[in-house]
Image (cartoon, rainbow, N blue to C red):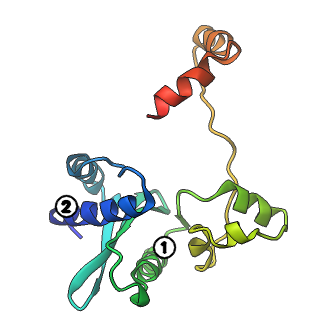
Amino acid sequence: GTEEDIDLFFNLMSATCRRKGVKPNPPTVAALRQLWLTFSKRNCLRVTFAEYNHEVVAGSLNIIFGKKVNLWKKGWNYKYPDQHPNDLLHYETLHWACSNKFNHCDVVAFDRSIADAMQNGKPLSNVQKKSPNIFHLRFGGMPKILPPARIWIANPFLRLGYEKILVRSGLLSKLKPLLSS
């Protein structure tokens, strides 16, 4: 896809978000276009579409960092489910990444409880087995548990203030809902 396809991808992504009951992120076509303009200059953004009978039915937006392809966003208008357009997009992305000598493909998000169970050799619950995250495992990947996010403040005085005031006082936990909205 190209810059001219940003509206099309946004519409597909928005259709998926409506089905899942979540807000699109990026929230607007303008925000997605700005992302495209920023990342595509360095060939770090790739949008791909799946068609059936000459109709675009699904799309995938990937961000490239170094030798890693991040399968960041996807969208599907829910037409022709028996044709498995999302499977096709994942397969195409993996094939493209291998053909272009990338080292890793990352699905960007995965249910922590499923990853923990798999890492510890525990069976998955029926709910976990029906999770949309299981889709990603069909392509041979394994979840990798990453350490929790951390904030590093180089200035020792600011770091101490952050630790004393925000973390230990509990103020940070009160701010988290405001920061994530």
Neighbour class for label 1 at 10 Å: few (<14), some, many (≥20)? few
Question: Depth-wise, is mark 2 or mark 1 nearer the camera?
Answer: 2
**Toward the viewer: 175 or 1?**
175
State the CA–CA distance, disc 2 to disc 1: 30 Å
Mark 1, secondary structure of its residue: loop
Neighbour class for label 2 at 10 Å: few (<14), some, many (≥20)? some
Q: Is residue 72 left or right of residue 145?
A: left
**Toward the viewer: 54 or 102?**
54
Q: Residue furthest left?
A: 4
Q: Residue furthest right?
A: 121
Quarter of the image that includes the N terminus? bottom left
Residue at x 46%, y 57% (from the top left corner): 66
Q: Is residue 149 left or right of residue 116?
A: left
Of the residues shown, which amino acid type is indicated by label 1? Answer: Lys
Q: Is residue 86 above or below residue 165?
A: below
Residue highlighted by disc 2: 7
Residue at x 25%, y 63% (from the top left corner): 11
Residue 105: x, y in percent? 53, 67
From this viewpoint, is residue 153 visible? no
Q: Is residue 56 left or right of residue 140?
A: left
Residue highlighted by disc 1: 101
Q: Is residue 61 above or below residue 145?
A: below
Of the residues shown, which amino acid type is indicated by label 2? Answer: Asp
Q: Is residue 8 left or right of residue 91?
A: left
**Toward the viewer: 56 or 97?**
56
Q: Is residue 33 above or below residue 57?
A: above
From this viewpoint, is residue 108 visible? yes
Residue 127: x, y in percent? 69, 67
Residue at x 69%, y 67% (from the top left corner): 128
Quarter of the image that includes the C terminus? top left
The earlier-in-sequence mark between 2 and 1 is 2
Which picture quadrant has residue 116?
bottom right
